[in-house]
């Protein structure tokens, strides 16, 4: 499937969710057909099954949250499984690299609008 097809299915599911309409294969297929995107006939049912198993609101609100919290959550069971009663070490803090400020055109001695 092309990325346009995947995007069409995702947008169709978001449209249906936003309007409060149950996400079904028939409704996804109707929206994708209305958008003039040609896909194989089995894709709408696969995407409908996918979207009925997950909460779309959680997907929308937690777009970037899983990437930041996953390593900490995975490390917690390992520390608890050690059993020695010792506290787990605190998670390492991320260091931010400061980027040098870009020079403006005025700093180079010329400008377009002078």
Image (cartoon, rainbow, N blue to C red):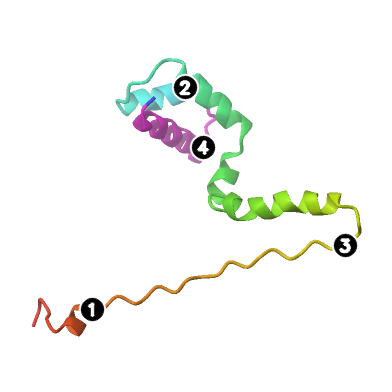
Residue 24 location (% of width, % of height): 52, 24
Residue 10 among magenta residues = yes
- Magenta-drawn segment: 2-26
Judged from the image, the secondary structure of the residue bearing numbered disc 1 is loop
What residue does disc 2 label?
Answer: 44
Judged from the image, the secondary structure of the residue bearing numbered disc 2 is helix
Q: How far apart are the two marked residues, 3 and 1, measured between alpha carbons?
A: 54 Å
Residue 22 location (% of width, % of height): 55, 29
Residue at the image position 45 percent from the left and 26 percent from the top: 28
Residues tagged 3 and 1 counted as in contact (Cβ below 8 A): no
Judged from the image, the secondary structure of the residue bearing numbered disc 4 is helix
Q: How far apart are the two marked residues, 1 and 2, measured between alpha carbons?
A: 51 Å
- Badge 1 or badge 2: first in the primary sequence: 2
Residue 89 location (% of width, % of height): 76, 64
What residue does disc 4 label?
Answer: 17
The residue positioned farthest toward the right in the image shown: 84
Q: How far apart are the two marked residues, 2 and 4, measured between alpha carbons?
A: 15 Å
Q: How far apart are the two marked residues, 4 and 1, measured between alpha carbons?
A: 46 Å
Residue at the image position 18 percent from the left and 78 percent from the top: 105
Residue 24 among magenta residues = yes
- Badge 3 or badge 2: first in the primary sequence: 2
């Amino acid at each position: 499937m092309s990325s346009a097809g995947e995007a069409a299915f995702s947008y169709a599911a978001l449209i249906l969710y936003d309007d409060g309409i149950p996400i079904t294969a028939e409704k996804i297929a109707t929206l994708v057909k209305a958008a003039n995107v040609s896909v194989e006939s089995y894709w709408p049912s696969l995407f409908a099954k996918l979207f009925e198993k997950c909460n779309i609101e959680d997907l929308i609100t937690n777009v970037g949250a899983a990437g930041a919290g996953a390593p900490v959550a995975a490390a917690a069971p390992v520390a608890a499984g050690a059993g020695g009663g010792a506290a787990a070490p605190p998670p390492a803090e991320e260091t931010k690299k400061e980027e040098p400020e870009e020079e403006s055109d005025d700093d180079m001695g010329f400008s377009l609008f002078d």
